[in-house]
Amino acid sequence: MIVWLAMLGVDFLLNGALFAGMYLHGGSFFLPPLEAFRRIPLGYLAFLVLALGIVAMASGHYRRMRTIPDS
C-alpha cells in the first residue's frame, strides 16, 4: 500500500506541478478533459496492479534467497 501511495504522490507531483503548463496550453495530442477524467481511475488501478506485482516479486525473491543453504 505504501508503494502505491508513493506512486500516486509522484503522479500528482508530475501532473500537478511539472506538466501543468502543458495542460493549460493544450495541444492536439491531449485527450479532451472529460475523456481524460474518465480514464483516471483506470490509471490508478494500473498503478495498484503494478505496485502489487513489484511487492510480490520483491518479497518472493527475498524468501528464495533465505532458503538457499550455505555452502
Image: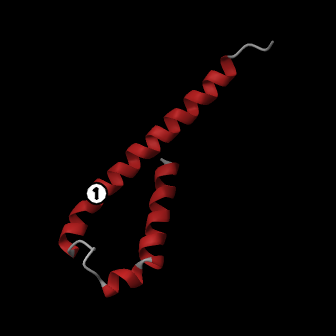
Residue 56: x, y in percent?
50, 34
Q: How many marks?
A: 1
* Picture quadrant where residue 30 is located: bottom left
Seen at 42% across and 77% down, the residue is 19
The local crowd at label 1, few if under 14, some if 14 to 19, many if 20 or more residues have their Cα within 10 Å, is few
In the rendered image, the vertical position of residue 41 relative to residue 58, given as above or below: below
Q: Position of residue 31 (x, y in %)?
A: 23, 71
Question: What kind of element bears circle 1?
Answer: helix
In this rendering, would 3 be left or right of 26? right
> Quadrant of the image for the C terminus?
top right
Give x and y (percent) for residue 27: 28, 81
In-image side of 70 versus 19 (left or right): right
User: Looking at the image, which residue is at 63% across and 29% down?
Assistant: 62
Please name the colour scheme applied to the rendered image: secondary structure
The single residue placed furthest to the right in the displayed view is 71
Q: Amino acid at mark 1?
A: Pro
Indicate the quadrant where residue 42 lies: bottom left
Question: Which one is nearer the viewer's eye here, 19 or 52?
Answer: 19
**Residue at the front extreme, as displayed:** 28
Q: Which residue is mark 1?
A: 41
